[in-house]
Amino acid sequence: MSRMHRGPLLSAGVMLGVGLGGFVDGILLHQLLQWHNMLSSHLPPDTLVNAKVNMFWDGLFHAFTWLMTFSGLVLLWRAGLRTDVPWSTRTFAGCLLGGWGLFNVVEGLIDHQLLGVHHVRTGPSQTAWDVGFLLFGLALLLAGGALIRAGREDTVPRGGLDTARTG
């Protein structure tokens, strides 16, 4: 059997995980729960102008998450065209979780901690919410890493018939 290359599936899954994790954040925390906007710590959306500025920056955030998701789909399509890429549910699911966790950790460290442009939920417990967001991201990274490691055993190439080893 020729050498298997997991890299294309790993890249696609992480990129999709970052994009989809960003969508969860943007849709759930920004829009449905309305806990924060991109600039809400510096520009509270308490006037029409402030709300419109925050909405614009939320739109840029969603454009970023869309681009990440689209890029992940392109990478996944390309990986699917290769017969040297082992299809592994465990690897792919691990990359999705890891990408989401990566999004949470990077976004939480940069936007919540370093720049302070917004917090998960502003108020007396905002530090606890921010730390919880980071811990959730770390848990996703750890769970994703465990699945990716378990997926190393999956060596059946795309379209392979051996379903016993495709997790």
Image: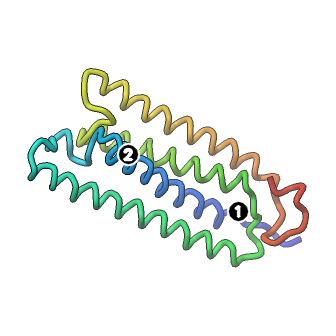
Q: Position of residue 165 (x, y in %)?
A: 86, 55
Q: Which one is nearer the viewer's eye here, 147 or 23? A: 23
Above or below residue 158? Residue 43 is above
Image-based side of 165 in relation to 91, left or right = right
Label drawn at residue 6 = 1
The residue under label 2 is: 107
Q: Position of residue 141 (x, y in %)?
A: 56, 42
The total of numbered circles placed on residues is 2
Name the image quarter holding residue 5: bottom right
User: Which residue type does callout 2 highlight?
Assistant: Glu
Q: Which one is nearer the viewer's eye here, 40 or 34? A: 34
Residue found 31% across the figure and 22% down from its top? 125
Residue found 62% across the figure and 76% down from its top? 78
Residue extending farthest top: 124
User: Which residue type does callout 1 highlight?
Assistant: Arg
Q: Position of residue 120 (x, y in %)?
A: 33, 36
Q: Which one is nearer the viewer's eye here, 59 or 8? A: 59
Spatial CA span between label 1 and label 2: 27 Å
Residue found 25% across the figure and 26% down from its top? 123
Label drawn at residue 154 = none
Q: Position of residue 81 (x, y in %)?
A: 69, 78
Image-based side of 93 in relation to 33, left or right = right
Name the image quarter holding residue 128: top left
Residue found 32% across the figure and 46% down from its top? 30
Above or below residue 126? Residue 68 is below
Image quadrant containing the N terminus: bottom right
Per the image, label 1 sits on a secondary structure element best described as: loop
Q: Residues within 10 Å of mark 1 (few under 14, many from 20)?
A: many
